[in-house]
Image (cartoon, rainbow, N blue to C red):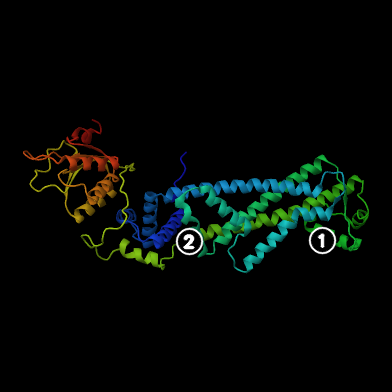
């Protein structure tokens, strides 16, 4: 069973859109002509938000941010496993610290403080931050985010964490997402403490006392029975007043007294520790899932407003409108289409004096000669809807392999399952420039495309030589 692509999840697509926006705010607009065209072809609805997210996915897959997202998610899962291990160890440690080694009597309220004290303080802190409308997940949430980034080990992942926080922060979802993590951590911690407590109580004999210099027995009777009221409704034992007072001087050796105190301690841990964390984890998970379904891009941001004209143009300009950038995106060929079919021949900028097309075997389609930007756009739009299984691109090696021609060859190759390049022979009486032919060979090898000087019609017709 193959793992689903990270770009298939709606949240991940929005996440990548934010990451691309941050990247373009820092470094300027990316070379996105092919991504824009493919996004328009793959988005029938034509909605701007869908166009932006599809464009971001295509750019992320091209530039490596989609793979960085996959690495970040793997790091997040590994960080989650490390926190789970920490929760298991912490929970067992709490139970051992509460009961001790069995050689000394157990102070019931000291044991209760060991089991629930830190949990109660952090829970009150989380509720306080919730009232203040803060999105912080506390130290545990920051630790998980830090570990996720460190374990990703991908330079392209630098903008992912800020993009995620910005995206979730607009809908106040950060608090609920990190709250699920925090409550789940403490739920596992307290569950492990409960299991360890039951194991220790089942295998050792413990005596229970309460000790105080300032408080009298009546205060402890009231406190013990108040805490034990809710657990008693679930069937846990509630020590009576005489038993509580008798336990104030020394640990009772009576078997019934041990069972009452042990049951009371387990019930209090369950009712005031596990159940609140479980209910809060479920509530936060519900708020998270509901919020994610309503999550959408903020199209009023300047970065997205700039894309409106590029993805939903009111008119299309022809010709070269912008100066060449200082650094160029490296074109690359590829074949990733599974639903392609048919064989197609296309030529790029041929001499009008050359006789074209040649005699073609049956079953091979001729796409003509691409000389203009409009012809290029029409062919690419057609191939984006009906990709070819085999594509043969004919080029005139008397022309120099400029970056525009090579980018077009690479873009055409990504619209077919298999692509080859045919470097045409020179007309009779004319010789090819050896240096220019060498430049063609070197450029096509960088694109990892098979090329030949003879017409590979057998391959184009049957798929093999």
Residue denoted by label 2: 295
Q: Residues within 10 Å of mark 1 (few under 14, many from 20)?
A: few
Q: Of the residues tagged 2 and 1, which is closer to the observer?
A: 2
* Whole-percent x, y for residue 262 in the image: 83, 49
| Vertical relation: 341 (above or below) 11 | above
Query: Which residue extends farthest front?
Result: 435
Q: Is residue 272 above or below residue 422?
A: below
Q: Note whether 228 is above or below 406 in the view shown.
A: below
Q: Taking the image as drawn, is residue 163 in sight?
A: yes
- The percent position of residue 133, horizontal first and vertical second, equals 59, 68
Tell me, for residue 449, which label it has, or none: none
- Residue lying at 28% horizontally and 48% vertically, measured from the top left: 411
Q: Is residue 75 left or right of residue 102?
A: left
Q: Earlier in the sequence, mark 2 or mark 1?
A: 1
Q: Secondary structure at mark 2?
A: loop
**Residue at the image position 62 percent from the left and 49 percent from the top:** 83
Q: Is residue 180 visible?
A: no
Instruction: For marks 2 and 1, give the CA distance.
Output: 44 Å
Q: Which residue is mark 1?
A: 226
Residue farthest along the left direction in this orientation: 429
Task: Report whether 225 appears left or right of 422.
Answer: right
Q: Secondary structure at mark 1?
A: helix
């Amino acid at each position: 069973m193959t793992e689903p692509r990270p770009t298939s999840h709606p949240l991940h697509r929005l996440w990548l859109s934010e990451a691309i926006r941050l990247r373009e705010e820092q470094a300027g607009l990316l070379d996105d002509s092919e991504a824009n065209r493919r996004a328009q072809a793959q988005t029938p609805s034509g909605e701007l938000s869908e166009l932006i997210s599809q464009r971001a996915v295509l750019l992320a897959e091209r530039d490596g941010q989609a793979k960085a997202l996959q690495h970040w998610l793997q790091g997040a899962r590994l960080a989650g496993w490390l926190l789970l291990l920490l929760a298991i160890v912490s929970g067992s440690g709490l139970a051992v610290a509460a009961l001790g080694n069995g050689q000394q009597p157990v102070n019931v309220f000291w044991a209760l403080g060991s089991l629930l004290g830190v949990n109660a303080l952090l829970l009150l802190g989380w509720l306080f931050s919730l009232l203040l409308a803060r999105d912080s997940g506390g130290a545990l949430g920051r630790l998980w985010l830090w570990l996720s980034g460190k374990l990703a080990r991908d330079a392209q992942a630098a903008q992912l964490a800020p993009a995620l926080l910005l995206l979730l922060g607009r809908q106040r979802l950060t608090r609920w997402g990190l709250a699920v993590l925090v409550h789940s951590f403490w739920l596992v911690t307290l569950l492990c403490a409960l299991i360890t407590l039951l194991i220790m109580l089942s295998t050792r004999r413990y005596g229970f006392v309460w000790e105080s210099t300032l408080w009298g027995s009546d205060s402890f009777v009231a406190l013990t029975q108040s805490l034990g009221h809710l657990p008693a409704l679930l069937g846990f034992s509630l020590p009576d007043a005489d038993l509580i007072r008798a336990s104030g001087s020394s640990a009772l050796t009576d078997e019934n007294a041990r069972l009452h105190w042990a049951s009371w301690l387990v019930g209090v841990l369950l009712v005031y520790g596990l159940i609140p964390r479980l209910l809060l984890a479920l509530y936060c998970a519900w708020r998270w899932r509901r919020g994610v379904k309503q999550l959408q891009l903020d199209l009023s941001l300047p970065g997205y407003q700039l894309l409106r004209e590029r993805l939903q143009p009111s008119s299309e300009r022809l010709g070269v409108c912008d100066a060449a950038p200082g650094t160029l995106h490296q074109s690359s060929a590829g074949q990733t289409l599974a639903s392609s079919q048919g064989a197609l021949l296309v030529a790029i900028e041929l001499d009008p004096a050359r006789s074209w097309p040649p005699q073609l075997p049956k079953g091979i389609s001729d796409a003509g000669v691409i000389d203009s930007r409009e012809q290029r756009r029409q062919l690419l739009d057609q191939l984006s809807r009906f990709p070819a299984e085999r594509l043969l691109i004919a080029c005139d090696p008397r022309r120099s392999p400029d970056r525009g021609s090579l980018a077009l060859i690479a873009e055409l190759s990504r619209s077919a399952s298999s692509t080859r390049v045919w470097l045409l022979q020179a007309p009779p009486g004319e010789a090819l420039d050896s240096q220019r032919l060498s430049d063609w060979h070197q450029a096509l090898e960088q694109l990892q495309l098979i090329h030949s000087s003879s017409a590979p019609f057998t391959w184009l017709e049957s798929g093999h030589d």
